[in-house]
Image: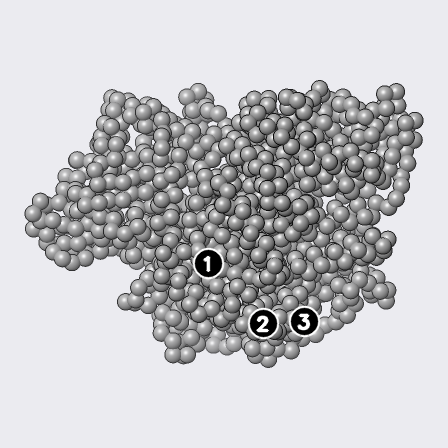
Amino acid sequence: EALVINDPDFQHEDLNFLCRSQRYEQAVKKSSLMVKKLREHGIADPEEIYWFKSFVHRGRPEPLDLHLGMFLPTLLTQATPEQQDRFFMPAWNLEIIGTYAQTEMGHGTHLRGLETTATYDPATQEFILNSPTVTSIKWWPGGLGKTSNHAIVLAQLYTQGQCKGLHAFIVPIRQLGTHEPLPGITVGDIGPKFGYDEMDNGYLKMDNFRIPRENMLMKYAQVEPDGTYVKPLSDKLTYGTMVFIRSLIVGDSARSLSRACTIAIRYSAVRHQSELKPGEPEPQILDYQTQQYKLFPLLATAYAFHFVGAYIKSTYHRISGDINEGDLSELPELHALTAGLKAFTSWTANAGIEECRMACGGHGYSRCSGIPDIYVTFTPSCTYEGENTVMMLQTARFLVKSYTQVNSGQRVTGMVSYLNDLPRQRIQPQHVAARTVTVRINDPVSLVEAYKARAAQTVHAYSPKNLQAELNHRRSKEDAWNRTSVDLVRASEAHCHYVVVKLFTAKLSEVSNAAVRAVLTELCLLYALYGISKNTGDFLQAGILSDAQITQVNQRVKELLAIIRPNAVALVDSFDFHDTHLGSVLGRYDGNVYENMFEWAKKSPLNKTEVHESFHKHLKPMQAKL
Amino acid sequence: SVNPDIASERQTPSFSVEELTTLLDGGVEQTRIRRAVAEAIESDPVFSRENQYFQSQNERYEAAVRKGVHLQKKIREMGWTEDGPEQKYINRALAGDVAFLLQHVFMRSISVLGSDKQIAKWIPLARQYRLIGSYAQTELGHGTYLQGLETTAVFDTATQEFILNTPKISAMKWWPGDMGRSATHTVAFAQLYIHGKCYGIHPFIVQLRSLQDHSLCPGITAGDIGPKMSFEHADNGYLLLQNVRVPRENMLNKFCEVQPDGTYERRGSQKINYFTMTAVRISVISVEVVEPLMKACTIAIRYSVVRRQSKLKPGEQEAKILDYQTQQEKLLPQLAAAFAFHFIDNYLQELFNKGYREMQKKNFDMLPELHAFSSGFKALVTQHCTSGVEICLRACGGHGYSLLSGLPSLYTKILASCIYEGENTILLLQTARFLIKCFMEASTGQSVPPSVTYLAAVKPGKCPAKNKLDFLRPDIYIEAYRHTAARLVSSTATKLQDLIQSGIKKHDAWNWCTVQLAQAAKAHCHYLTVKNFAETVERLETRAGIQKIMKHLCDLFALHGIFSNAGIFLHDGYISGAQMDMVTASYLDLLPVIRKDAVPLVDAFDFTDKSLNSALGSYDGQVYQRLYEWAQKSPTNKMSPAYERYLKPLLHNTLSKL
């Protein structure tokens, strides 16, 4: 962090005042410098590279993201030793800059639907790549538009007249030296987006573009010179990468929400508005209950997601050891869990960032608040690496499968083990939980049980039961699944919510410092109770809590707000975001908001001249005429 | 040519699209005028928005000024008059992407707050654009709470002038539209001081810039406040006043006057003024809030029948994403909400017109109720529509994130509506204050305004529904909403009373209950929206096809509200757990029914492709072709110095040395 902040090469104008081309240029400049400095400082550990990068780009995307994050790792995992010899060192030295071109204009999360073709020609020992339709044009890959000269392209492989499914090919797209697109290649930038201004997300269209046979990544599947196809051994391994990237998104949800909370809470301590008591000065807006009710549950959520992110990361590292030894038994659950948690945390954080922005009133809407930037950078994570609704349904599929196993007498393990208890309670759902759970609303452990009961009931009552009912209506299995999917998403949400409460609670006992544990316990209680008060329907309907208890929960939430209030600023200070990283005038550590807003505004491009040229061009002629 | 995937959606609508369009417009004649205005504006290349997604803030501002100037010419050419029926369609056709929108606000505030003499002096100048007006109320440190403003205006009897000052940084005017670069004048609000005594907030006309060369007047510091989440075309400004002197006649003095000797006089009733301010909140709902949601629904639903993804059944073609229940559950409730809010907006417009007539007759009885309506509905509708637009955006997957989808700009613009004209939480609490007061009065047998008489009849009860079909009966679900709203108001009132009786000070008790108060206010407005929707559907009896589909949408709107707020309906057992399962079943059953008419329903909103300005939402469904062609026009594809300056050295020299 200090390395970057103290390095004059990385200083630059406020990006808010630059247009897209300028922001792209700045980002390329910084990325180039970054690679140079990484090598100078001898930083090679992925974790350290990640931190260095996030400070250079202040948490924003950059044009080399895909080169470093996808192109190089894919070479390492999917290329043969000969291919690594050919491509890896040039790519490491950035003579080759690559990206990863998967998504097409008409096809996203459903990979099998991709249309790009790679047809093997044994006569010349080449693959002929084609984009046969408009919908098959590669669309969105980062760094593809202007930066990269190579791409790993996913295409349907055709050999000996048969389609063999998706495979990866290394495709040169621009001439080394001139950087001009190669003949047969149409490549460019896809235009402006909500955010990601500094990234040249691109399109790629290929017309009978030929590459040598050796450019297919052949560590697993292979095409022999005569066109014979050799199948890969296992396809489960690709799960590992997906789990890893989704676990990063969970961490990113925590971080982005923490940044937004830091800004909103600090600003709410500086902003004064209206009066609480007649005759007294305007109070800090953080003293209003409605403001606390907007922000403190989000603060608690940020902490909760932080612990969830850490848990998934460590679980992944633990399991990836097993995977290397050929043990894939834990992978399905982890895969299902990360899919759901990716969706759950990114949806929650996405909405939370917007809440924070709105809680800053009008000034939150100014780009100087920094929150618009956090939002537009974060919000695509609800879509990329697996669209959230699809992710929730993957988790649901796992839940239903586990439930079916339990019903057929098998036991399940891990986070879904609560399903084991269900068959023994073959009674109406309304009565089960009421007998089994006595909820103590001041005890996190007891609240975990309440969430567990809710998850069990939701899985039991809404999903397989309705699925069965639809099947009984003589609908096809697929139709029944579709007609139950809204319920299935709810079941996954209840499951993920339970996991988050459970992991947060489990974390408390690991904290040794008593004062820290006390304040974290308050946050944990707030997180759990607020979740109940927002989903009272589920808890009431399943009979887990009574009307009177719900009233107590609502009451207790408000008491906790008042308890957390004195520590609120300290709790966001603990996130330890440097002002330059936060990029917000409202969220400055020193709280000198107004004078700095004025200084910031003076730099706006509209203010470059005292009289704007539009006056001479348009206003003056009009005034003369009318 | 039309994409066959979207053409097939239009083959068998259950109702006449044209007739629904007419219904939404309020008559055949309105539809005709609206289309004529749209045609006149959209056929004029000056108003084209095709490049707006590629433009920088400076370019957007310049384009808006150019359009603003051109619009005046257009209006005269077309012979549109100031109070003609065309006016309200002009802004719809321009999508607000034009400068000088504050001219109206400037003129209205003078008309409402100024004396006849002041009106005669300033309004013609503004009408002819001899000056460009703005409206400077909000300050850097002060927003919705007006009494907190810090700008001062001190009367100087010697020169018969007011001296305006910005005493500290938080008192700087901040945010007013058109003020950063364009405006020559503004109505500035300041604390009036005479002989050292403060008389509260008053409006003053202040000249900002020279009418000759546009340079800033002495004592004025003004500029643009910098980039925002949207409104790139608008030069929202800051204003710092240092001993700026304006003549005594520049204080708008319909309701009060400062005599030459400094005597302060009040006159007339402020109530009509108060009413006008209230009415502004309602006037923004249609164009600024409901139409963007309609546009977002149009884009997302059309795209969802063109986009195919995964398979519903093995062996079949990939399915249209609108055939997935989860996609229907995202989009169709937003569509239903767009209709619900369109109808509540009609209702409110009528109510306010009636209120206006009464108040001109000096009958102010309706004022408290109208004020509560304007606050509560502004908050409910803006919040609901904003989240609806965001849902549409996210339902379009990756392509929704492209500016070319049109959705990001709809979203970033509509979300400002949650804050301007009063921050939503504060507005809900104003409505809550009215509800609590009425509840207290009703419980002691006093008469209360018609919209809140139901509060008098709070009693425990059970929902009588016996099966899922019962929840398609408006009387059943309206009663559920009424019961829940009344329960939330009465339980909060009780709690407030208890706190006060236990010795807690009134304002502390109020702050302690605000979360529940806001919830109660929302429930009240939600109830009225459902009720009004159902009543509107009932009146449609002669138009069979339309009434049927509107009934489905009304049911969906009502049941979606219960489904997503289950807790407050279950809370006192009014709806049982088993009944909630029936609600869910009926709600989900409606989705495939409405799905069949989804495209004809959005077609009926009748937005032209130009006004949608979206690669995903065009009428012909040629999504991918349009996206590809449009992207190629992006300036990033024209020239980028990044390669020569940075990439080339990177690729060739710098690193090979390492």
Q: Badge 3: how crowded within 10 Å, few (<14), some, or many (20+)?
A: some
Q: Is residue A322 above or below residue A613?
A: below
Tell me which numbered mark, 1 or 2, is placed earlier along the sequence.
1
**Label 1: element kind:** helix
Examine the image and state in which quarter residue A365 appears.
top right
Name the residue tied to disc 1. Answer: B301
Q: Is residue B336 visible?
A: no
Q: Amino acid at mark 2?
A: Arg
Q: Amino acid at mark 3?
A: Glu
Tell me which numbered mark, 2 or 3, is placed earlier along the sequence.
3
Please tell me the numbered disc located at residue B333: none
Examine the image and state in which quarter residue B6 appears.
bottom left
Q: Quadrant of the C terminus of chain A?
A: top right
Name the residue tied to disc 2. Answer: B543
> Which is in the foreground here, disc 1 or disc 2?
2
Q: Amino acid at mark 1?
A: Ile
Q: Residue at the location (81% across, 48% down)?
A: B272
Q: Quadrant of the N terminus of chain A?
A: top left
Same chain for labels 1 and 2? Say yes or no: yes
